[in-house]
């Protein structure tokens, strides 16, 4: 028990305390998955460049980044679908390609098409048959919100319902670790919220969840820890509020005669972009920056100072790549 | 104590049987899925049946009506394997479905086995329908022995072409899949004598035919319905066996290359 309590879990202790729910999940492994100095190349492009990541038990981690940042590569490495060119990947203390690791892991991938003439309950039954101790079918249906559509053909489902079936497939083996690659793509707000609840319930049951997303709202709503990844490297890591505050400080918007290069050189300015005729400045100590700006430019106008929303923090971190493109 | 000793063996037995149960379920659902897909089952079963109703009926009561039962059965074997494995697997690969299966603990042999058995089942259905049609409306008699050996060939003959299907699946770009597979399958059917005796083909094609594994399949089918003497069987089976090994090796190499990317 002491090993559990000393583990730096990012979830409140009440969520991991009930010993009964932990029986099947060995307490010795505080880190359920690791990527160590992983390099993965596709031809001449490096999808991951010396990437380190640790996933701890019972936590929800969001890998946040623009398309092509390396999120899906990280997930595919953890699933043993690809092997690293350098570095090491471990899942539940094992090679991710081992049958043992795969039996304790559930995955939801971006699948363009699933056999459409099979019924929802048949898809679930087939995946459950792969595991020696599967989650009861009724439990899968309930957790993934598939009740009422069990006897529908996959091809007749809406986009959101299809995503829920894929989520259900990830739960079939009663996994210790769940990997969700862009889980809520194509979902309406209501289904998205329901899936978020289901993901939270997984973590509350002692499971670890890694999800990739480029929905900032999703990382904010779900994750205990956010890893911002860009161009194959982790560029920031922390709780959603740390990412928001620690990263971007404050956002200053104004119209000024001063050149961007001059403003960028001011103390505590972290990044800067132009927005039509205005400058948008991210600064750790906005008061100092505003004081200097007003002193140096008496024509300065349209001044706004605000807390940067997560989206702005994200854009500042990833060099202005639009996360949704 | 006695409860424990009783409880352990069934659990261990269940674990040992798990791979077989998975193979069974995988096969059951693969077959259900293909049969329910009307576009697929109508074309794979429908084409040889329709051809027989047109051309077989035109030669009603002649040996040609029997010949076409053998030929169209071979057509069913090759098409169900090339489309049912080659095309289906190429699509599953491109659409990410195969990745999800690979990431699960599903044993590879269950996935492969299910596909082979499903194709053999389709070939068997096609052979059975053709035999029934021949006897019912073709004006010929397919004896029980002939029917059984042709049905057996439909199953066994699926193995070499299933191996070819796996290889093709890793070769074709999925968007162009149907076109390219037709480009392999239709000339193969024609040149192997599925539609008419090889002796009626242009001379240069007659020279090509013996190097095609599908030609040897057709020759065995003709022996099954006693339209050809049995003395060449050793060669035909050797060619099919060698072809199977070659295709399995080629498929295995491409499969491993894809596993490791």
Image (spheres, coloured by chain):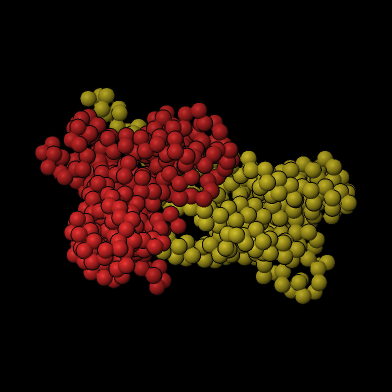
Chain colours: A red, B yellow
Q: Is residue B200 left or right of residue B156?
A: right
Q: Is residue A268 left or right of residue A101?
A: left
In the picture, which quadrant includes the N terminus of chain B? top left
Give the residue at x 23% y 61%. A294
In the image, residue B39 sits, relative to residue B81, either above or below, namely above
Give A251 or A304, whichever is nearer the viewer.
A304
In x, y percent, where is residue A310?
31, 50
In x, y percent, where is residue B26?
50, 43
Give the residue at x 37% y 38%. A196
User: Where is residue B221, by image quadrant?
Assistant: bottom right
In the image, residue A275 sits, relative to residue A214, either above or below, namely below
Residue A84 visible in rendering = no
In x, y percent, where is residue B177?
62, 60
Residue B42 visible in rendering = yes
Give B215 or B104, whichever is nearer the viewer.
B104
Q: Is residue B145 left or right of residue A154?
A: right
Residue that extends furthest to the front in the rendered view of this protein = A298
């Amino acid at each position: 028990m002491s090993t559990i309590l000393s583990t730096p879990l990012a979830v409140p202790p009440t969520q991991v305390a009930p010993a009964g729910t932990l029986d099947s999940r060995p307490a010795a492994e505080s880190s359920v998955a690791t990527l160590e100095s992983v390099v993965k190349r596709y031809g001449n492009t490096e999808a991951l460049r010396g990437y380190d990541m640790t996933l701890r038990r019972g936590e929800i981690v969001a890998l946040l980044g623009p398309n092509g940042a390396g999120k899906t590569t990280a997930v595919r490495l953890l699933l043993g679908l690809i092997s690293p060119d350098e570095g090491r990947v471990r899942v539940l203390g094992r090679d991710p390609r081992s049958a043992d690791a795969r039996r304790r892991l559930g995955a939801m991938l971006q699948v363009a098409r699933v056999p459409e003439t099979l019924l929802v309950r048949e898809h679930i039954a087939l995946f459950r048959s792969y595991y020696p101790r599967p989650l009861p079918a009724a439990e899968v249906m309930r957790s993934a919100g598939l009740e009422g559509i069990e006897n529908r053909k996959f091809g007749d489902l809406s986009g959101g319902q299809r995503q829920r079936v894929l989520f259900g497939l990830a739960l079939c083996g009663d996994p210790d670790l769940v990997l969700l690659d862009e889980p809520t793509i194509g979902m309406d707000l209501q289904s998205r919220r329901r899936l978020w609840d289901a993901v939270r319930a997984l973590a509350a049951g002692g499971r670890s969840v890694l999800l990739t997303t480029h929905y900032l709202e999703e990382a904010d709503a779900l994750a205990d820890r956010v890893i911002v990844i860009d161009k194959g490297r982790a560029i920031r890591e922390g709780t959603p509020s740390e990412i928001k505050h620690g990263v971007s400080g404050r956002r200053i918007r104004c119209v000024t005669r001063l050149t961007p290069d001059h403003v960028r050189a001011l103390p505590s300015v972290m990044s800067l972009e132009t927005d039509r005729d205005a400058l948008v400045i991210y600064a750790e100590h906005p008061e100092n920056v505003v004081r200097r700006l007003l002193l140096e430019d008496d024509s300065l106008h349209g001044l706004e100072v605000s807390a940067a929303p997560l989206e702005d923090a994200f854009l500042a971190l990833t060099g202005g790549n639009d996360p949704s493109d | 104590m006695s409860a424990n000793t009783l409880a352990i063996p069934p659990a261990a037995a269940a674990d040992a049987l798990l791979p077989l149960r998975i193979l069974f379920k995988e096969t059951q659902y693969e077959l259900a899925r293909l049969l329910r897909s009307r576009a697929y089952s109508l074309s794979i079963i429908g084409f040889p049946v329709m051809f027989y109703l047109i051309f077989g009926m035109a030669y009603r009561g002649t040996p040609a009506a029997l010949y076409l039962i053998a030929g169209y059965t071979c057509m069913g074997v090759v098409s169900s394997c090339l489309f049912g494995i080659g095309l289906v697997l190429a699509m599953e690969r491109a659409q990410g479905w195969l990745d999800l299966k690979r990431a699960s603990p599903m044993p590879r042999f269950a996935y492969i086995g299910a596909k082979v058995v499903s194709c053999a089942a389709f070939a068997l259905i096609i052979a059975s329908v053709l035999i029934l049609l021949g006897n019912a409306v073709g004006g010929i008699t397919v004896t029980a022995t002939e029917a059984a050996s042709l049905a057996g060939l439909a199953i066994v003959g699926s193995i070499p072409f299933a191996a070819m299907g796996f290889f093709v699946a890793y070769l074709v770009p999925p968007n162009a899949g149907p076109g390219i597979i037709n480009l392999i399958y239709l000339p193969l059917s024609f040149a192997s004598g599925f539609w008419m005796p090889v002796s009626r083909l242009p001379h240069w094609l007659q020279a090509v035919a013996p190097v095609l594994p599908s030609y040897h399949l057709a020759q065995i089918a003709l022996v099954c319905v006693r339209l050809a003497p049995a003395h060449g069987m050793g060669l035909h089976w050797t060619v099919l066996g060698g072809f199977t090994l070659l295709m399995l090796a080629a498929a295995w190499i491409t499969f491993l290359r894809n596993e490791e990317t």
